Image (cartoon, rainbow, N blue to C red):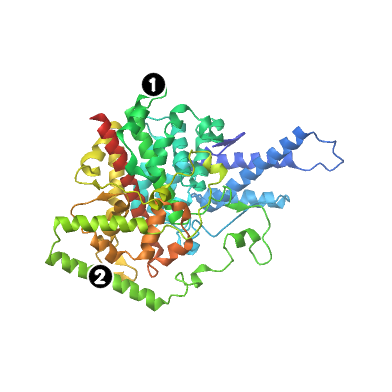
Amino acid sequence: MEEGEVRWDGLCSRDASTRDAALENIRQAVLRRIAQNSPVKEDPPPESSEGHLASATALERLNEMLARLLMLSKRCPFRDVREKSASILSNVQELGIRIPRPLGHGPSRFIPEKEILQVGNEDAQMHTLFADSFATLGRLDNITLVMVFHPQYLGSFLKTQHYLLQMDGPLPLHYRHYIGIMAAARHQCSYLVNLHVNDFLHVGGDPKWLNGLENAPHKLQNLGELNKILAHRPWLITKEHIEQLLKTEEHSWSLAELIHAVVLLTHYHSLASFTFGCGISPEIHCEGGHTFKLPSVSNYCICDITNGNHGVDETHVSPAGSISTTESFCEVEALMEKMKKLQECRDEEEASQEEMATRFEREKRESMSVCCSEDEESAPTRDVSRHFEDTSYGYKDFSRHGMHVPTFRVQDYSWEDHGYSLVNRLYPDVGQLIDEKFHIAYDLTYNTMAMHKDVDTSMLRRAIWNYIHCMFGIRYDDYDYGEINQLLDRSFKVYIKTVVCTPEKTTKRMYDSFWRQFKHSEKVHVNLLLVEARMQAELLYALRAITHYMT
């Protein structure tokens, strides 16, 4: 974390005196930058274009430092860093320099800020989790602050991500972040792209690679095809795709490197789903997370209006729009009644294998007709699309042309019996970490549904997981797919399909329109299921192709 002569690493230390020394160093560096940028009182000599450029760059660097201090004053788990960062900004303001202020209303555009745990208000266990995350990444990002609704999952997620990005492994560090950028860019997820561009440069990545995939090494360019298919149509992956990567003489991948790359691609495709599904806001220190403009009289500026932030406390507006609380309440009651009846039917009779297969095919066909988005498709922005090729390729083409998705039977190739051991053999410990994360997301329950306690939600969780896998053509022989239509209504299906297949088209309206009486923590839990079910689906197809290549 070095910017010129400024080192930010010391702020991640658990030792207060180390942090204090780092903060003093940062304060001095800020004052030096201000002195370099201060206007000359007398008539200045005419400045060359190089001089203009240099002063503009110096001002840009100062503003980057101030934006980072703003982020630290709000998001650092160490109180001394928060307070000292705020104090430095205050001193800068007293010198007549304009300081940044946050844009938006907290870590998520969908969840009111007051419902999300505020940094500084966490208990000891949570503080340890926050401090670990900050020490590892140098930030406490908005994804973490939304996932914290579910601490057990967050712990597993952070441990897995840390291992993939920073621990010993087949791929060099800068390759890992670049692959993260490639994967997030497939879904135009500028939030994740921006984070990993910074991380890529921090670990010594070549800035030229960021000008476009064609500037990266051929080895990474060759990964582009696998990235594209995995993100949008994983059922098309064959052993030939694997062979191409492993046997390209000059730029070939080893099996261990390829497993590492596949896990990273699936991790970031799924994380893009979470980012859009929970309406994650830009980080405070990144573009779109702060502004140097003064607030207007009514306390929100024109940029807030275009973002749909009208200064209204969203909690006063019913998320269901015109739907009354009574109707939403009835929705929960009706869902619980359906779960009870389905359980009774399960106990009474079991459908034949033929009938089960028919129900799966019907649900798979119907899932194709669920419309992903009410909005017109938009072309990816240049700054993100340069990180991948073939921008027109997506899930939409397949569903629009009514192509058939072949059925993948879990009985023939499963994560538990096949994928897990393959990953663990070629990239030790990662199979174990991913497996733990799958189980935590799938088994996570507080035995509540909206305002009801002591509820067994396993039937509902299984329906959500299996519906996602059904969209990818994955079938469990022992599951009755007729349950999905009983438990998941159309607005919920639209939300699931959009978040999983075309996450960049997710809207707040979609988020608000399903499970209207449920808590935000329950909707975040849904997103954890979507993340893990999607990641497992992609992994199953990729790992099966690798297994076919090896046998």
Q: Residues within 10 Å of mark 1 (few under 14, many from 20)?
A: few
Residue 286, compared with residue 485, is above or below; it is above
Seen in the image, is 73 located left or right of residue 325? right
Q: Which residue is mark 2?
A: 338
Please tell me which residue lies in front, 167 or 29.
Answer: 167
Q: Quadrant of the C terminus?
A: top left
Residue 232, compared with residue 277, is above or below; it is above
Q: Position of residue 227 (x, y in %)?
A: 41, 39
Seen in the image, is 460 located left or right of residue 29? left
Type of amino acid under label 2: Lys
Q: Position of residue 386 (x, y in %)?
A: 53, 39
Q: Which residue is mark 1?
A: 249
Q: Secondary structure at mark 2?
A: helix
Type of amino acid under label 1: Glu
Q: Position of residue 55 (x, y in %)?
A: 73, 38
Please tell me which residue lies in front, 310 or 220.
Answer: 220
